[in-house]
Image: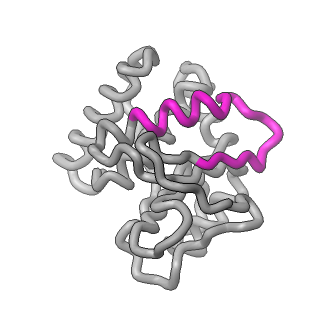
Amino acid sequence: MDASVSRLKKSAPPHEKSALSLAKSPRSAAGPVEISWSTAKHPLSDRAVRRIARAALHHGERAGLPIAVVFVTDKALARMHGRWLGDGRPTDVISFDLSGEGGGPAGELYISVQRAAAVARRRGVRVERELALYLVHGCLHLCGFDDHGARARAKMRSAERAVLAGLGFEDDPTPFE
């Protein structure tokens, strides 16, 4: 589904300041969730984004983890995908584990709103649900979940379904990558 660079050993992750200017937030029990939209459409409210992210982090046993979520275009995410993972094709979500970087968020998620809208249309689900899936998926990567290999992917999918169901999203039994 996505590209995770939690184990990538390149120089420090992007901190794409052009997409998100982060103010260093104090850590709190709920964990700050910084949000930036570089797209015209905002299918989820910032409040919903925080709620979804916190539910996923709680499920992954990293409640309180400070993260930044940046909603971008397909073009911007494909560019990042190429730069950081050597694959210039469009993708849905990229997660960066910054926990060893000090200061700022411990993780960053970059999510393509355009990809979510296209995939939602193709799958026959609401775009809000598809974006929530990408957000949950990226957060679970920050919690140590992986989706490389059948067993790990099954565990990831089960966790995604559990978090989404707990948030009241309808189940989507359609297979996906």
Residue projecting furthest to the left: 151
Q: Nearer the viewer, residue 74 or 41?
A: 41
Please tell me which residue is depicted at 22% across the width and 41% down the height of the picture.
155
Picture coordinates of residue 153, whole percent (x, y): 26, 45
Please tell me which residue is depicted at 17% across the width and 47% down the height of the picture.
151
Q: Examine the rendering and report whether any part of residue 109 can be seen.
A: no
Q: Nearer the viewer, residue 22 or 134?
A: 22
Please tell me which residue is depicted at 60% across the width and 26% down the height of the picture.
128
Q: Which colour assignment does the render follow?
A: one colour
Picture coordinates of residue 44, whole percent (x, y): 65, 29
Q: Examine the rendering and report whether any part of residue 78 can be seen.
A: yes
Asked if residue 123 lies left or right of residue 136, the reply is: right
Span of residues in magenta = 34-55
Picture coordinates of residue 157, whole percent (x, y): 30, 36
Quadrant position of residue 20:
bottom right
Picture coordinates of residue 149, whole percent (x, y): 22, 54
Asked if residue 177 lies left or right of residue 46, the reply is: left
Q: Nearer the viewer, residue 42 or 86?
A: 42
Question: Quick check: 141 above or below 106?
Answer: above
Quadrant position of residue 41:
top right
User: Is 50 included in the stretch rendered in magenta?
Assistant: yes
Asked if residue 8 lies left or right of residue 87, the reply is: left
Quarter of the image that includes the C terminus:
top left
Residue projecting furthest to the right: 40
Count of numbered badges drawn on the protein = 0
Question: Quick check: 111 above or below 170?
Answer: below
Question: Quick check: 91 above or below 123?
Answer: below
User: Is 61 included in the stretch rendered in magenta?
Assistant: no
Please tell me which residue is depicted at 72% across the width and 57% down the height of the picture.
75
